[in-house]
Amino acid sequence: MMTTRATATTFRNTRPPIRALPDPRPGLRRFTGALLIVASLISAALCYWVFSSWLPSDGERYRNYVAAESCTPRETEQGRTDCLSTWRLTVDETENRSGKQASYKAVLTAQDSWRGTVHFGDPGPLLEQLEPGDEVEATIWRRDIVVLSKGGVRQSTSEAPRDELQMNAALGLLAAFLAAQASVFGAVRLAKPRDVEPFTWEPYGRRLLFTAIGVCFGTGLPAVWSGIPWWTVPVVAVPVMVCAAWSMRPRPPRTAFGALLR
């Protein structure tokens, strides 16, 4: 019995050690980091396009629209489009549907067999009153119907330029915040694929993303409603986002020794 036990013990102690398999995560993390760097470059390019092209173009278009005057008979004959021309059109049909598949539009016709559709952002105050056969006055600017009116009631169409540059700035800032987050998270994965803490999706990355969305829309929408200048959006949003990112950063856990020192 003693010999048997000794043999069994020797057999157990001489089993070859199990080799640890190589960790496949560093390679995957480097690949993810490269994708994040590419995404950051795309977001940065989008941010540049918003502030260098889209926002100035919309601002200039709105200023030209506000400064436009009614066309003279000569300008109408010449086909000028930078002035405001008025045409009498007939309502052929309307669609006033709210909900998830909202649709606000009116189909208009003219005596020369012209037929077109104009869209609205909401049903009031004119669209909800229109019925087939009604005659309306259409204000045209740069070949687009920008306003419909009937009996003194006016409503701008979706083609009418609006002073909503604040949301342009908010979307540009969101692209900038996403570019910054993606570049940092990607660089960490390329430089230190085995130790990416705390730059992970849970919880820091998720919190940063949703905070950026909330900050951009939380500053852009009130700016549109109040009519304050668009540049106030980055002035407010950037410091708020920096403070939020700093306050949400993961902190190392407190040890018992560290607690005694406090």
Image (cartoon, helix red, strand yellow):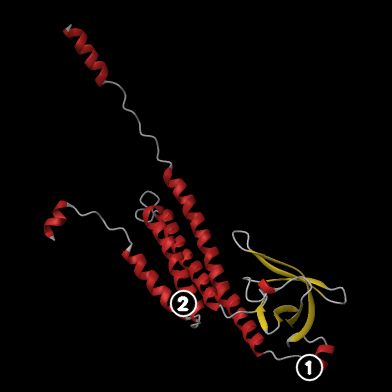
The part of the image, by quadrant, that contains residue 115 is bottom right
Horizontal relation, residue 223 to residue 120: left or right: left
Q: Visible in this render: residue 141? A: no
Q: Which residue is at the front of the view, 249 or 150?
A: 150
Residue 131 image offset from top left, x and y in percent: 74, 71
Q: Which element type, helix, strand or loop, lies under badge 1? A: loop
255 and 206: which one is in front? 206
| Separation of residues labelled 1 and 2 (CA atoms) | 40 Å
The residue mark sitting in front, 1 or 2, is 1
Residue that label 1 marks: 72
**Identity of the residue drawn at 33% across and 66% down:** 246
The quadrant of the image that shows the N terminus is top left
Q: Is 116 located above or below residue 77 in the figure?
A: above
Amino acid at dot 1 = Thr
| Residue 184 at x, y percent in the picture | 42, 61
Label 1 CA crowd tier, 10 Å (few <14, some 14–19, many 20+) = few
Can you identify the residue that label 2 sits on? 233
Tell me: residue 7, above or below residue 16.
Answer: above
Query: Residue placed at 48% from the left, 64% from the top?
Result: 179
Q: Residues within 10 Å of mark 2 (few under 14, many from 20)?
A: many
- Tag shown at residue 100: none
Left/right of residue 98 with respect to residue 44 in the rendered view: right
How many marks do you count on the picture? 2
Quarter of the image for the C terminus: give it. Answer: bottom left
Expressed as whole percent of the image width and height from the top left, the position of residue 157 reads 67, 75
Q: Is residue 60 above or below residue 249?
A: below
